[in-house]
């Protein structure tokens, strides 16, 4: 199974794009996979196909595969989001602790600390971590060595997710209701969409349609597609309630959503596809 290794950055292959016209709301089905989560937020796949889930209120990290869910890390203060690199090193951000942990071979260490309310992290094209620091209204770039620089600050209120969508181009979710396109070269913000009530930490490049992103509405329901060219915003599903986490498995053309509304994990697939859980 062709799993990606990070929370929010996806390679779009020709085999996936061949099916982009099928991934519309008329062709989708949604299935609940697990309901034992506790305020789930960020998610990430490792190279073995395990889906890791941050349980914010339970201070733990679960992982899911083939219908089974288990707790693998405990006593993480308010874990909010993940990024997993090609070596299966796990980066875990904390919402209240101000720390991003690095977990290698089951051993946890501090990667960076002194942050304020980290809501989302994702790798950029150069292997740096993009950090949505909600508490200071900014987005940071952190090198693999831990060097911190400010990517974007002026113009943001409460950023909860940031991903790279091209050379010097980023999309940023602000939970106040605005989704921005940000050009880093000239520090220019453009409003892409104000349709969602509260855009969440779940923000990914659309693996099924070029030049668009997918995100979820914590303040409402469902999954949305947003065009990067004209900001057109389309609701693809009206479930689940209060979704927060979002990730794609581009190999099987499936999406996974973690929802606060019922503390559950959902899978979204094409109706014509048949896959194991």
Image (cartoon, helix red, strand yellow):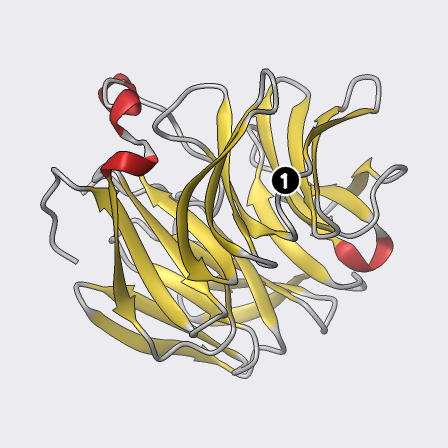
**Corner quadrant of residue 136:** bottom right
- Percent across and percent down for residue 7 are 47, 47
State which quarter of the image contains the N terminus. Answer: top left
- Percent across and percent down for residue 83 are 51, 51
Q: Is residue 173 above or below residue 82?
A: above
The residue singled out by tag 1 in the image is 195
- Percent across and percent down for residue 177 are 71, 47
Q: Nearer the viewer, residue 234 or 205?
A: 234
Q: Nearer the viewer, residue 270 or 74?
A: 270
Which residue is at 44% across, 57% downward?
Answer: 43
Tell whether 30 sits left or right of 152. left
**Corner quadrant of residue 71:** bottom left
Which residue is at 64% across, 32% downward?
Answer: 171
Spot the residue most to the right.
154
Q: Nearer the viewer, residue 145 or 117?
A: 117
Q: Residues within 10 Å of mark 1 (few under 14, many from 20)?
A: some
Q: Is residue 104 above or below residue 36?
A: above
Which residue is at 29% across, 59% downward?
Answer: 50
Q: Is residue 228 above or below residue 130?
A: above
Q: How many marks?
A: 1
Q: Is residue 219 visible?
A: yes
State which quarter of the image contains the C terminus. Answer: bottom left
- Percent across and percent down for residue 214 are 48, 38
Q: Is residue 250 visible?
A: no
Which residue is at 68% across, 68% downward?
Answer: 95
Identify the element where label 1 is drawn.
Answer: loop
């Amino acid at each position: 199974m062709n799993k990606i290794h990070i929370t929010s950055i996806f390679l779009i292959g020709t085999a996936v794009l061949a099916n982009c016209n099928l991934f519309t709301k008329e062709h989708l089905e949604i299935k609940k996979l697990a309901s034992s989560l506790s305020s789930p937020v960020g998610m990430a796949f490792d190279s073995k196909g395990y889906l890791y889930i941050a349980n914010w209120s339970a201070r733990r990290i679960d992982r899911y595969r083939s219908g089974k869910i288990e707790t693998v890390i405990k006593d993480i203060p308010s874990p909010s989001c993940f990024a997993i690199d090609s070596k299966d090193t796990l980066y875990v951000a904390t919402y209240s602790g101000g720390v991003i942990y690095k977990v290698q071979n089951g051993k946890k260490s501090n990667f960076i600390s002194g942050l304020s309310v980290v809501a989302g992290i994702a790798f950029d094209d150069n292997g740096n971590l993009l950090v949505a620091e909600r508490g200071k209204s900014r987005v940071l770039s952190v090198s693999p060595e831990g060097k911190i620089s400010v990517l974007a600050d002026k113009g943001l209120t409460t950023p909860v997710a940031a991903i790279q969508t091209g050379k010097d181009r980023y999309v940023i979710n602000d939970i106040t209701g605005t989704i921005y396109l940000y050009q880093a070269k000239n520090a220019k913000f453009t409003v892409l969409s104000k349709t969602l009530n509260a855009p969440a930490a779940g923000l990914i490049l659309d693996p099924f349609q070029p030049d668009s992103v997918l995100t979820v509405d914590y303040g409402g329901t469902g999954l949305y597609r947003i065009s990067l060219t004209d900001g057109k915003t389309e609701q693809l599903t009206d479930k689940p309630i209060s979704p927060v986490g979002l990730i794609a498995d581009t190999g099987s053309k499936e999406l996974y959503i973690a929802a606060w509304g019922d503390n559950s994990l959902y899978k979204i697939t094409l109706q014509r596809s048949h896959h194991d859980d």
